Image (cartoon, coloured by chain):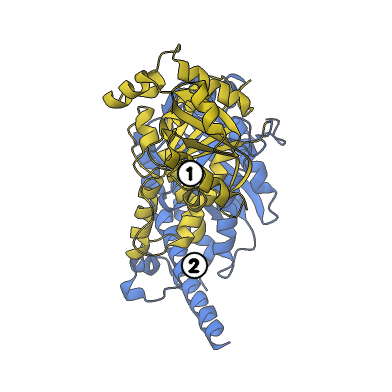
Chain colours: A blue, B yellow
């Protein structure tokens, strides 16, 4: 049987090569405990409070979550930044790229989609004072705002990355997490998008399967994606079987 | 942290709700440190015009885009729909010094998309909860405040001119609102507009049981601003009606 965990193997390798060949990158180990104060669930950063904007609708933006069972391919707790750190960018509006690499256990064709969504939606649980995020996973975009007070107080890529990594590691099936942030240039975000594009198509196909339960492959926009990824076909077969069983019941 | 205070403006068409709303926004936006959200629930986006804002996108535009996707079979799943709408609504905010404005747009039409409408209401309510004061400038009745924006407000402000018809509509809205089924509110009061003098204001107070929050005189300057399409936010600071609106806000405990 094909392994669902190999869906993103090539993309992860591509992202790894991208990181390794990047010049001027910075890297930190995540703080074990996030020391930044919580936002109290009322996080909104308006222009008048704005210190830094990342991936706004007018800028390039990419947000991608990739997972694998190959824990050795993930440098647990590592935060890498390509481009200027948030603390050095007061008053800027920068392009933004974010890739989360998660080393996980226990993903199967039955639960992979649900666990993926579980991880993907963790970003909404980040509650840091002076930080606001809006995203559209359909377009893999993420739009962040950081207040001027937060920037002055030292809110950095490490602050944000640590909070995200700690949230991921609270999940029992997550064994390792690594985050890449990119603020260098729109061209770099576009290059990264090219690398993550196969994963984007796979995730879109999974979303379609799960939301529509439409198994008419001939009329599906993602037929080619499924044809290229046999794991998706197996996932679709399982979903179709479950759907038919539900109809019989 | 303070709780969000929500103000909804209602009253017969043409009595000056939108001008008073704009003057309220101007006063509130100058009280530093508080986040003010103005919601223009008038299909003609009159509040945006009075604030000098050209609206890029309304909530209704967002709704229509999504419905188009649903109709062409290109709709995202429900969680993705929620985050897409959340993203788009924030992107539709017009942010200015001291306040932000969200325009609702034209009322729903062509078919029932209750789920989309309810999602949008949830998102607006969630967004509003992140501000300190929310001011909703609506159409005449209170039903559309509930239907299109939110059901629970702190202050229901009825606006009327001195005409019997205007006062009659305000009294009727108050009566309809009294069972709190359409809109749940904590306080309700009347603001009179285009009043000639105090005597006239006193005289009108005998024709209503509503608490009168204050009255604005017939202001040539406002008429002139309206005529020229100039934003009321640029009204001179010594305008008598601007300070009257400030007093009204103080009476409503929205300004110190």
Q: Are marks 1 and 2 in contact (CB under 8 Å)?
A: no
- Residue at x 51%, y 33% (from the top left corner): B37
Along the line of sight, which residue is nearer the eye, A90 or A17? A90
* Residue B152 visible to an observer of this rendering: yes
- Residue at x 59%, y 26% (from the top left corner): A155
Element type where label 1 sits in the image? helix
The quarter of the picture where residue B126 lies is top right
Along the line of sight, which residue is nearer the eye, A154 or B247? B247
The quarter of the picture where residue A205 lies is bottom left
* Residue named by callout 2: A210
* Residue named by callout 1: B168
Is residue B163 depicted above or below B78 in this figure?
A: above
What is the spatial separation of the Cα atoms under label 1 and label 2, in whole angstroms?
A: 55 Å
Estimate the x, y position of residue B56 in percent, counting from the top left: 33, 38
Quarter of the image with the C terminus of chain A is bottom right
Crowdedness of circle 2 by 10 Å Cα count: few (<14), some, many (20+)?
some
Tell which residue pokes out farthest to the left in this image: B228
- Residue at x 47%, y 61% (from the top left corner): B114
* Residue A95 visible to an observer of this rendering: no
B227 displayed left or right of B51? left
Tell which residue pokes out farthest to the top in this image: B238
Is residue B206 depicted above or below B198 in this figure?
A: below
For mark 1, name the chain: B
Estimate the x, y position of residue A106 in percent, counting from the top left: 64, 63
Estimate the x, y position of residue A161 in percent, counting from the top left: 59, 37
Along the line of sight, which residue is nearer the eye, B240 or B167? B167
Q: Tell if the residue under mark 1 belongs to the same chain as the one under mark 2.
A: no
For mark 2, name the chain: A
Is residue B92 depicted above or below A84 in this figure?
A: below
Estimate the x, y position of residue B249 in percent, counting from the top left: 57, 26
Element type where label 2 sits in the image? helix
């Amino acid at each position: 049987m094909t392994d669902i965990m190999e869906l993103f193997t090539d993309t992860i390798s591509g992202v790894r090569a991208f990181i390794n060949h990047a010049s001027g990158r910075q890297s930190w180990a995540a703080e074990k405990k996030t020391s930044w104060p919580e936002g109290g669930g009322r996080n909104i950063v308006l222009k008048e409070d704005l210190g830094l904007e990342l991936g706004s609708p007018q800028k390039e933006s990419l947000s991608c979550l990739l997972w694998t069972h190959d824990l050795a391919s993930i440098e647990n707790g590592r935060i890498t930044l390509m481009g200027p750190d948030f603390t050095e960018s007061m008053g800027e509006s920068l392009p933004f790229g974010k890739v989360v690499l998660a080393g996980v256990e226990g993903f199967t064709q039955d639960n992979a989609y649900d666990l993926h969504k579980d991880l993907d939606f963790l970003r909404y649980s980040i509650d840091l004072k002076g930080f606001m995020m809006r995203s559209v996973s359909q377009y893999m975009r993420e739009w962040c705002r950081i207040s001027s007070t937060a920037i002055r107080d030292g809110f950095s890529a490490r602050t944000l990355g640590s909070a995200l990594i700690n949230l991921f590691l609270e999940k029992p099936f997550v064994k390792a997490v690594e985050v890449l942030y990119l603020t260098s240039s729109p061209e770099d975000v576009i290059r990264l998008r090219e690398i993550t594009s196969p994963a984007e198509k796979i995730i879109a196909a999974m979303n379609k399967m799960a939301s529509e339960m439409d198994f008419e492959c001939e009329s599906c926009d993602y037929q080619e994606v499924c044809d290229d990824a046999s794991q998706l076909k197996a996932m679709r077969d399982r979903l179709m079987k479950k759907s038919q069983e539900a109809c019989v019941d | 942290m303070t709780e969000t205070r929500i103000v909804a403006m209602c009253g017969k068409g043409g009595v000056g709700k939108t001008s008073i709303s704009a003057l309220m926004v101007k006063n509130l936006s100058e009280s530093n440190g508080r986040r003010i959200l103005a919601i223009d629930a008038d299909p003609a986006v009159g509040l945006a015009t009075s604030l000098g804002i050209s609206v890029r996108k309304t909530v209704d535009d967002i709704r229509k885009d999504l419905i188009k996707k649903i109709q062409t079979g290109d709709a995202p799943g429900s969680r993705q729909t929620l985050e897409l709408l959340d993203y788009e609504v924030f992107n539709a905010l017009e942010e200015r010094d001291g306040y932000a404005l969200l325009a609702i747009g034209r009322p729903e039409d062509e078919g029932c998309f209750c789920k989309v409408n309810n999602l949008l209401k949830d998102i607006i309510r969630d967004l509003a909860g992140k501000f300190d004061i929310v001011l909703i400038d609506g159409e005449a009745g209170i039903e559309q405040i509930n239907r299109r924006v939110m059901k629970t407000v702190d202050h229901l402000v009825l606006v009327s001119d001195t005409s019997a018809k205007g006062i009659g509509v305000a009294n009727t809205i108050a009566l309809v609102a009294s069972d709190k089924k359409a809109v749940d509110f904590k306080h309700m009061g009347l603001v009179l507009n285009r009043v000639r003098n105090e005597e006239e204001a006193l005289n009108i107070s005998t024709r209503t049981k509503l608490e009168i929050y204050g009255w604005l005189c017939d202001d040539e300057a406002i008429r002139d601003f309206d005529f020229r399409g100039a934003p009321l936010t640029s009204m001179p600071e010594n305008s008598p009606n601007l300070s009257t609106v400030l007093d009204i806000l103080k009476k409503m405990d929205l300004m110190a």
